[in-house]
Amino acid sequence: MKAMLLAAGRGERLRPLTERLPKPLTPAGGKPLIQWLLERLAAAGCGEAVVNLSHLGEQLAAFLGDGTRFGLRIALSREAEPLETAGGIARALPLLGAAPFLVVNADIYCEFDFSRLLGFSLQSNLAQGDFSLRGAAVGNDAAPRYTYAGIAVMSPALVAGVPPGAKAQLAPLLRAAAAEGRLSGELYAGRWQDVGTPERLAALEKMLASDHGHR
């Protein structure tokens, strides 16, 4: 199964850092965020990844190369301007192919075991991924609600209605799939941190520094 890392966003809330550095290259614990993810994907058995680029994209392209040093083959999907999540995925479909693929936000740190999803069968579902959760069924009701962690297995059919090159958000498509009973999920209780603000980045640095100090 291929993986797609979403790396085209501007990272507005991390300015001024992201005025000179694409958000996925933000260092944490001595490595850029995207490097943690690529190495974890390779260790889980993923062999191919697609990364979408836009804001300061050539910096990211230079860092990624062809992926060899991370143990992956990397293809790049360039966007003249960020197309939002669903728009970016739709544009990358020619590189992803017709089979389900793993999607990961490139601006998170997590210790999720990707090997559990690389062989996942969606069956009739469109995706497995702020929704309610009853067992494995994802919904939009008043049951306990959890944050979408930016990790999912998706069918190309989920974004089939998005014209290539169009801007489109992912959340409405996931909500529609949930309403049709075609979205499943699970609760992840391990380490996960988005790096949307300087405060969250500082919290992640503190956590990773503590890990290093205990070794």
Image (spheres, grey):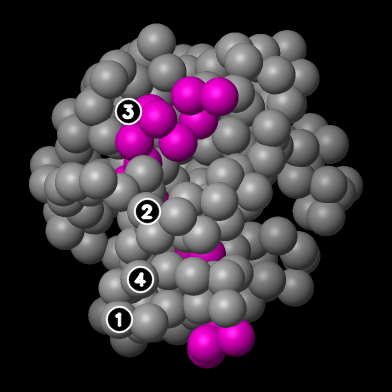
170 sits to left or right of 97: right
User: In this picture, which residue range is highlighted in magenta?
Assistant: 142-161
* Residue position for label 1: 135
Relative depth, front residue between 80 and 143:
143
Circle on res. 182: 2
140, above or below 180, in the image = below
- Which of discs 2 and 3 lies nearer the camera? The answer is 2
Q: Are marks 2 and 1 in contact (CB under 8 Å)?
A: no
* Secondary structure of residue under mark 3: strand
47 sits to left or right of 172: left
Circle on res. 137: 4
Relative depth, front residue between 47 and 143:
143
* Secondary structure of residue under mark 1: loop
* Residue position for label 3: 49
What amino acid is found at the position of numbered circle 1 in the picture?
A: Gly
Residue 187: image x %, image y %?
Answer: 36, 77
